[in-house]
Image (cartoon, rainbow, N blue to C red):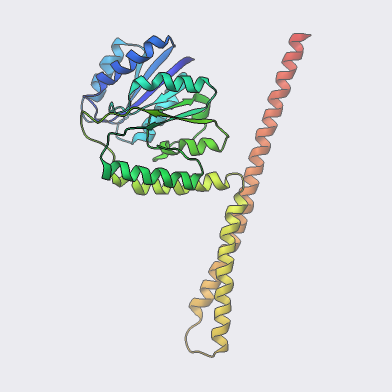
Amino acid sequence: MKDLSVIAPLYNEEECVRLLYEAIARVVEPLRLDHEILFVDDGSRDNTFKIAKELAERDKRLRVIRFRKNFGQTPAMAAGIDHAQGKILITMDGDLQNDPEDIPRFIEKIEEGYDIVCGWREKRQDKLITRKIPSKVANWLIGKVTGVAIRDNGCSLKAFRTDVIRAIPLYSEMHRFIPAMASIAGSRIAQIPVRHHARKFGKSKYGLSRIYKVLLDLLMIKTVVSFSSRPMLCFGSMASLAASGSLLTFAYTIAWMNRNERGSLVVLIGTAMLLGALTIFFLFAGVLGELVYKTGNLKMNTLADIRASFTGFETLRKEG
């Protein structure tokens, strides 16, 4: 296993590939670590892959992963993480806006005992209206919803312990929620300011169109973070709302009948029965969630006990 893996997703970055490789190599080589560089070509339609492949043929420490089509930043990052061989993984953008000169500082923080180190762009060189303001709002909202206050969730320059990041599912726009997901397992998280450069080549692949995806992922993260170990609380709350609606509808129906007002009661009765059925569904879903959670924990604890028993047996046998 190597000491360090540097991962950079690329999409139509033919002007940046060579400069990025040279910048990373220039910073990492003096560290005297057994390292590798992974470029993940996310279905580029220019010469990005061709240039990266030529570089990899000259330097065996550079590996290139290629997607047949464009899947997005998070899947590209996940592919790099899955194929990485380093104990410490560092992710960064491939557009030269992140500075490889910051890499040694991330390694120092990891060696201090942190599991995840997040960079925040101290002097961000992006457009105010379309990038900075939406980012600040998103960071504030993510912090409030998840309870994990990260100053710059959108900064790709991060460092991870391999065993921590590989336990976190990545899809859609989930790379920005890694700290929130890791907090469930009690991971130690640090933040450091990093340099940020204005884009010199090409154009940004990100814009306001991603907002709805981020909001949906945020809703999912909130559910996981809040109710991962208490599924009955989640479904019980929804069951209470449905039951309240059902009772109120029945009460209104009875009051309507007592006043002898004309009109069909089919809609009211049907709504009350539907909400009642929904209450029962949520309660059963909560019970099922609790059963799955408890069963999963029991199996994990049992496996841990078995492994510990075998470890103890081997130790005693060697001492004897």
Quarter where residue 50 is shown: top left
Measured from the top left, where is residue 36 in percent x and y?
Answer: 39, 16
Which sits in the foreground, 315 or 198? 198
**Residue found at the very far right of the displayed protein:** 320
**Residue found at the very far front of the displayed protein:** 123
Q: Count the numbered circles shown.
A: 0
- Residue 38 sits above or below residue 250 on the image: above
Which sits in the foreground, 246 or 191? 191
User: Which residue is found at the position 58% from the left and 88% from the top?
Assistant: 258
- Quarter holding the C terminus? top right
Q: Is residue 6 left or right of residue 12?
A: right
Measured from the top left, where is residue 263 in percent x and y?
Answer: 47, 86
Measured from the top left, where is residue 179 in percent x and y?
Answer: 48, 36
Res. 293 visible in picture: yes
User: Which residue is found at the position 26% from the left and 22% from the top?
Assistant: 17
Which sits in the foreground, 206 or 50? 206
- Residue 69 sits above or below residue 243 on the image: above
Which sits in the foreground, 198 or 96? 198
Measured from the top left, where is residue 104 in percent x and y?
Answer: 41, 18
Quarter where residue 78 is shown: top left
Quarter where residue 47 is shown: top left
- Residue 233 sits above or below residue 246 on the image: above
User: Which residue is found at the position 41% from the left and 49% from the top?
Assistant: 216
Q: Is residue 7 left or right of residue 16?
A: right
Res. 169 visible in picture: no
